[in-house]
Image: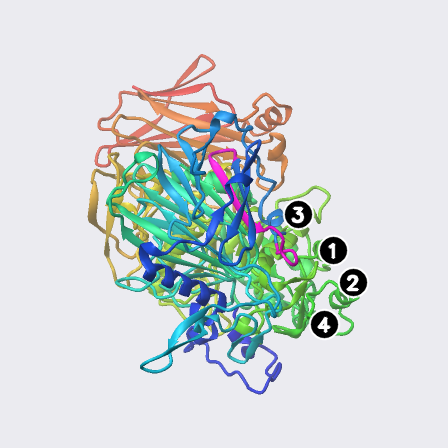
Amino acid sequence: MKWGQRCLSRFHVLFTIGLVFTLTTTTLAMKKDDFKTCAQSGFCRRNRAYADIVTETGDSFQSPYTLITDSVRTEKSHIYADVKNTESDILLTLDVYLLQDNTARVRVNEKQPIKPRYDGHGKHTLQAEPVLQEGLDKNNVETSPEGVVTITMNDDKTRKIVIHPNPLRLEFLVNDSPVISLNNRGLFNFEHLRTKESHKPKMIQHDKDSESTEEKEAPWESGSWEESFKTWTDPKPNGPESIAMDITFHDFGHVYGIPEHASSLSLKETRGGDNAYTDPYRLYNTDVFEYAVDSPTSLYGAVPFMVAHRVGQSAGVFWMNPSETWVDIVKSKSEEKVLSFGKKSSDKTSTHTHWISEAGVLDVFVFFGPTTKDVIRQYTKLTGTPMLPQQFALGYHQCRWNYINQKDVLDVDSQFDEHDMPYDVIWLDIEYTDDRKYFTWENNKFPEPIKMEQVLDSKGRKLVVIIDPHIKRADNYRICEEAKKDGLFVKQPNGNDYEAWCWPGQSSWVDFYNPEAREWWKEQFKFNKFIGTQENVHVWNDMNEPSVFNGPEITMQKEMIHHGNWEHRVLHNLYSLLSFQSTSDGVRERTAVEHRPFVLTRGFYAGAQRYGAVWTGDNMADWDALYYSNPMSLTNGMGGIVFTGADVPGFFNNPTSELLVRWYQAAVYQPFFRGHAHIDTKRREPYLVPEPYRSMTLAALRERYALLPYWYTLFYDASQVGTPMMRPMFMEFPDDESLFVTEDQFMLGSGIMVKPVTVEGATSTEVYFAGDEPWYDTLTHAVVKLTGRHNVNAPLGKIPAYYRGGNIIPRRERVRRSSHSMKLDPFTLVIALDTQGNAEGTLYVDDGETYDYGTGAYIHTKFNYSNGALTCENIHADPNSKAAQQYAKDMKSLRIERIHILGVSKKPNGIQAESNDVKENLVFEYNSAHAKISIKDPKTSIAECGWTIAVA
């Protein structure tokens, strides 16, 4: 929900502050002047101006930062030295760490700051301390007479790091050619801490009259110690403390990532020009009302992780800093010149980025790849792989603001059953609480919440309730009184609790940076504290950017104080991560036998993938929003936030029936699938849609549930190596340059290609058929032997989706009302043959609820079809463990009930199953029009291999 909706709820007049907010949500759009541009953000303005000076000066400019060559030292895989700013004589420390898995880390800090700079976020952002590669051999480090230090990575001798001393510049090389450089353009700028009295602003020559000049303070220097925005003044007690660095991706014409923005998959340039923005991409968690699309404006989350890709190589950087950050992007054709080791640069396009953060220290991880999947694996090895959710979370979720009472909830639940529509979760927005006091119930509307939850539980369904981080200031409200008594709220600079406005009216915000506050928050989810909840109740964290209705940019003032006396400015983006973590831990720890929690968050930062799901916020019910749901979800996945999706079919306004159908079709193939609606919209539960749209929506829901085995297997893979389930086309076809900007179609895993229809009235659409293997229509199973771009039929009842030749897709096709009812259902295998007549795929199964899979209680099976025979292989990490064997025994009855083999040119003479030397002829059908074999009930187990199905 949004700040602008605060006058639309049951409380008609919450507060006044010299003005009254009156909104009509069907007509308002994003108010851009509520949010800063770079020119209105002092530290961004200063660093952009610095970049302009460097650019205008040209080759005569030299960065003032110089490596003190006689200070260079090496200890194991750690190289460190001092760096001097020759303009200010301030000393900095440079640390370069060589990490495992083709990763490097670069840190720069003040050597003797007047007080510590903030550097405490790594323990929350990273899942563990990064592991150094094995100690450097003396032959791995070379220093030239000019002081150039060259380090060869141990893991891969083709990777090198070169540190140039004067000016300081770092190059990261593959095969002796630079792929990434730091300070290549000389934009490195480290604003040291100082007193106001010692501050010396930048001065420029100003024409006094036609014959003389005078020196004046540069206009971009204003706001260094105090900055105003609208009615707000930021006192900036530490003065200027920003850090900035240019990072060049050599010969990479495309970069991706840095969510969250409603922008393109391939990030645009930001210095003006055709199809470019004029402001940098901003990373500053904010609550943006009815956000604009095709914009670099910051949204709810911030992940400062960028991936670059070209044919034959991917690389990436993670700028680990949770303060407000801006990223400029420009591209250039490089002139041929000699680089390190005598290599010549090409005339390919390079991408130049300029990273600017308000505070903290410089802490950058560089990933050598070589593939995009490798870069994401390297990143998630540091920040954590995505959690494996409970299986119900992959089903359909039904939400609106608000289901008004207990009867309403159960009526919606029963209507899904009456219309044979599957769903797993129903949601409650803020109106379920007693006067917006979280962890309470409105007893007149929800007199017996446990009974309501038991009805849902009897069908295997769940309830999700909203819990936000702002706490109503109210007497006799246990949550507020405990937090006040124990000092668990964010403070004002004078030491009093920070108070402002949000949904409950006057509120305070839990200080999740305080470890005692995190522990206290976790306790609130226990069933003896959150009265009226049981195990099938899960949680939704909204408004945790944090959203503050009467704050600057609808968020918390930067001078507010967190635990440890740290200003909010230094850790703003971290706030959402810590609230998300604390909630997820609380839901997990509330039972004696821990179950995987389901928590949805709106605000997020790097590492959020460890705790649950994210959605793209309060979008519009229009065709543009449907279109951008795809690149936004793809970009989130590229940033490690793989469990992501958009409100279906848009939060604000009333969708047409056509839009609703198209959005449900698209959401089948997006990781998080939730219908949601604003309080002022008409009811649009899928069973209310008139025919023929209702049947089309039902078909989409059933397809989602049929694909749950494939989805769950992809989620498991993501939990192991970080690869997103929903993937850009170039991730699967990395050498096809025509796909590097493709954002309107995508891959689901490696086996399904999807092209959502996002144009009103369209009955056909263009699809790009990549690669050399055949594709198969997922609905008809007909083979598509096309390559390149082609127009395909896409009537309203159909979304173009295709199986990729060479893949085996597991499905469950019995119609059920929830995923819980499917747990013991048999499987269908769709075998999509490649040009050689081969295919392979995997299936992962566990209890779908607990952490028992961590002890080995799961099934992991690989299916292989080659030479006309289907076999299976147990690929369990430890198949002989007691837990693995017991689980396989318990699940022995899980079988394959149907097999479709696609791309078979002639009818077989027969099909035979063999297991334990026993052979059995199988019943099958052959469809010559679609070149498909359908085998009925081979009765083969997915838990016990050793069988073969041969097609003769």
Whether residue 521 sits left or right of residue 382 in the image: it is: right
Q: Which mark is residue 494?
A: 4
Frontmost residue, 603 versus 408: 603
Residue at disc 3, secondary structure: helix
Neighbour class for label 4 at 10 Å: few (<14), some, many (≥20)? few
Q: Which mark is residue 516?
A: 1
At label 1, the amino acid type is Glu
Whether residue 646 sits left or right of residue 467 in the image: it is: left
Q: Residue 113 lies in magenta, yes or no?
A: yes
Range covered by the magenta-colored residues: 99-118
At label 4, the amino acid type is Asn
Residue at disc 4, secondary structure: loop
Q: Residue furthest top?
A: 917
Residue at disc 2, secondary structure: loop
Neighbour class for label 2 at 10 Å: few (<14), some, many (≥20)? few
At label 2, the amino acid type is Asp
Whether residue 161 sits left or right of residue 768 in the image: it is: right
Q: Position of residue 617 (x, y in %)?
A: 48, 62
Q: According to the image, label 2 marks what residue? A: 486
Q: According to the image, label 3 marks what residue? A: 588
